[in-house]
Amino acid sequence: MISVVIPSYNREKTIVRAINSVLKQTYSDLEVIVVDDGSTDNTRAVLSEISDKRFRYIYQENAGACAARNNGIEHAKGEYIAFQDSDDAWRPEKLEKQIEAMQYYNADICFCRMERHNYPENKEKFYPNIAEGIVEYKELLLKSLASTQTIIAKREVYNSVMFDVKVKRMQDYDWMIRAAKHYSVCFIRDVLVDLYLQNDSITTFDYNKIQQINEFFLEKYKNLCDEYPEFYAKRLERIAYYKTLAGENASREYQEIYKITGKRKDLVKYMMARLGLLKAYYSRYNK
């Protein structure tokens, strides 16, 4: 059986769509666990209308999405656990195709592609765009490729790797950094998730907050910075990029990146940052 955990906070308008997209899966041996993270809207009343025996509702005082996911894991009965977001939808064959892929590649974790809706034009519509098959740890480390609602894993993975409640953004990336270190991960290119960006979504783009979470990762994973210099450079690049967009000078960060990579493009960015030209460049060419 597959346990599907859906953390939710004030999603009365979208939660039923999310649940129904799970209940209508071609892989029917499943349970759906909604963990209501202290909603103050009509979530409880809306969910009381669902009569499917595979559905369970758990209420908790507001503690955040990671705490809600961990709560769902503790109540899950399945040998596999997957996560859905309360404002997104799955396509009917998602679970069936992912189970088949995990068996074919002998993998512990599987993630798939998704289609982004309501996202800025410069974001890839279908994501990620990588080769199908086993994904190496370094590739998962350098870039956040797997969004939570695209992931399914064996129960044993979640028994040893829970979500970190201190992480407020990019929880999926943080979880994958730790899980993929010890378990095998496969990817299928099928687009099986529809992701909808809401105005109050945690994934809403805030330059300062994205900069802060990357600083948090550098502090949390100091050991990986030594083991994988590319990881340090990549997180530093994200900090520098969003720092630049926020109107701050990121020449120090770009100088450090160039020292690590030795790449000409990073030297050019450092020089442009020193001259105060980088924000205008990004504003023009990163639309």
Image (cartoon, helix red, strand yellow):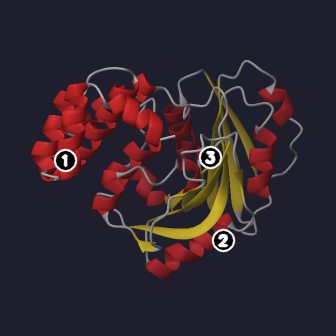
Residue 181 seen: yes
Which quadrant of the figure has residue 225? top left
Q: CA distance from mark 3 to mark 2?
A: 17 Å
The circle drawn on residue 224 is 1
Percent position of residue 119, x then y: 62, 41
**Residue 217 percent across, percent down from the top left:** 29, 36
Q: CA distance from mark 2 to mark 1?
A: 35 Å
Where, quadrant-wise, is the N terminus in this rendering? bottom right
Mark found first going from the N terminus, 2 or 1: 2
Amino acid type indicated by mark 3: Val
Q: In the image, is 273 to the left or to the right of 57?
A: left
**Circle 2/circle 1 CB separation < 8 Å:** no
User: Quick check: can you spot residue 182?
Assistant: no
- Quadrant of the rendered structure where residue 252 is? top left
Residue 127's spot in the image, x, y percent?
54, 57
Q: Are marks 3 and 2 in contact (CB under 8 Å)?
A: no
For mark 1, give the secondary structure.
helix
> Which of marks 3 and 1 precedes in the sequence?
3
* Pointer 2 residue: 96
Q: Is residue 133 above or below residue 95?
A: below
Query: Which element type, helix, strand or loop, lies under badge 2?
Result: helix
Q: Which residue is mark 3?
A: 5
Please name which of the two marks, 3 or 2, marks the residue nearer to the observer: 2
Which of the two discs, 1 and 3, sits closer to the camera? 1
